[in-house]
Amino acid sequence: MNAALLVNRRGAVATLQLNRPGLHNAFDAALIDTLTRALEALATDPDVRAVVLAGAGPSFSAGADLQWMRAMAGASQEENRQDALALARLMRTLDELPKPTLARVHGASFGGGVGLVACCDIAIAAEGARFGLTESRLGLLPAVISPYVVAAIGPRQARRWFATGEHFDAATALRIGLVHQVVAADALDAAVQAQLDLLGKAGPVAAASAKALVREVHAGAGDRDALDRANAGLIAALRASDEGREGLSAFLDKRPPRWTSGEAR
């Protein structure tokens, strides 16, 4: 990967670190493309059990690069549409990645940076982290990231934060559901590792399938019969799988399942 994105592999965990610290990891078209391709490669890597998304320097991500936005302001409507579709592809790739994902959040997380946080399965923030869906201050809206942010914080909260563009702190992010945990800055890495340890104890297929199950349950909530059939099919497939059989056997035999030898660490 180029210098704007650092990829570190340690055991079964891949860490993707946005690496534009001088710009608070603001992204442009090149970084969006690079991050998307990195995620697509990890999606099919059987040795990767979990993915951590982090930022270098003082911030997680300040959203869009102002120079990039200035250039797009002079572009045509069609060029802007294609540019927005590239960001949409990134967000959807991260949201649907068939691996558990964790956002390690510190410093500023604004605009599209909030979108990245919302797309991750687990989000842990340092106490000093700051957030904001600030697009309305520019006469814009967080349209591309809205499906993921609204899914995280709900429509009632989204109405306020989308409209005002105001900043909010980590405690508020926790209260409204954007992040799952807030810890002291010096405890951030340990908190991330604790979640990785838990993921390492879960069945790899089960952990990777969890987000798909949640998405399908949410989408199918109006058709209860179809939802019951889909969920019955899923649990039947898992029970009959090698992983499901090993998990049950290990439980009955009072031993760790075989997959814990390759914990997500």
Image: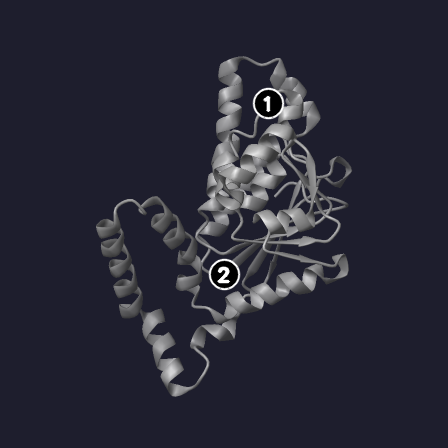
> Which corner quadrant of the image does residue 192 belong to?
bottom right
Residue 201 percent location from the top left of the image: 49, 71
Does 56 sit above or below residue 198?
A: above
At x 44%, y 61%, the residue is 207
Label 1–label 2 contact, CB within 8 A:
no
User: What is the three-letter code of the residue carrying label 2?
Assistant: Arg
Residue 132 percent location from the top left of the image: 66, 37
At x 64%, y 40%, the residue is 2
Q: Earlier in the sequence, mark 1 or mark 2?
A: 2
> Which corner quadrant of the image does residue 231 belong to?
bottom left
> Which corner quadrant of the image does residue 30 belong to?
top right
Would residue 20 be visible to someone looking at this image?
Answer: yes
User: What is the three-letter code of the residue carrying label 1?
Assistant: Leu
At x 25%, y 50%, the residue is 224
At x 34%, y 71%, the residue is 244
Would residue 265 be visible to someone looking at this image?
Answer: no
Does 97 sit above or below residue 187?
A: above
Nearest the viewer among 114 and 46 is 114
Residue 160 percent location from the top left of the image: 59, 34
The quarter of the picture where the N terminus appears is top right
- Which residue is identified by label 2? 49
Nearest the viewer among 224 and 80 is 224
- The crowding category of the residue bearing disc 2, from other C-alpha atoms within 10 Å (few below 14, some 14 to 19, many at least 20), is many
What is the distance, in whole Å, between disc 1 and disc 2 at their CAs?
Answer: 37 Å
- Which residue is identified by label 1? 140
- The crowding category of the residue bearing disc 1, from other C-alpha atoms within 10 Å (few below 14, some 14 to 19, many at least 20), is few
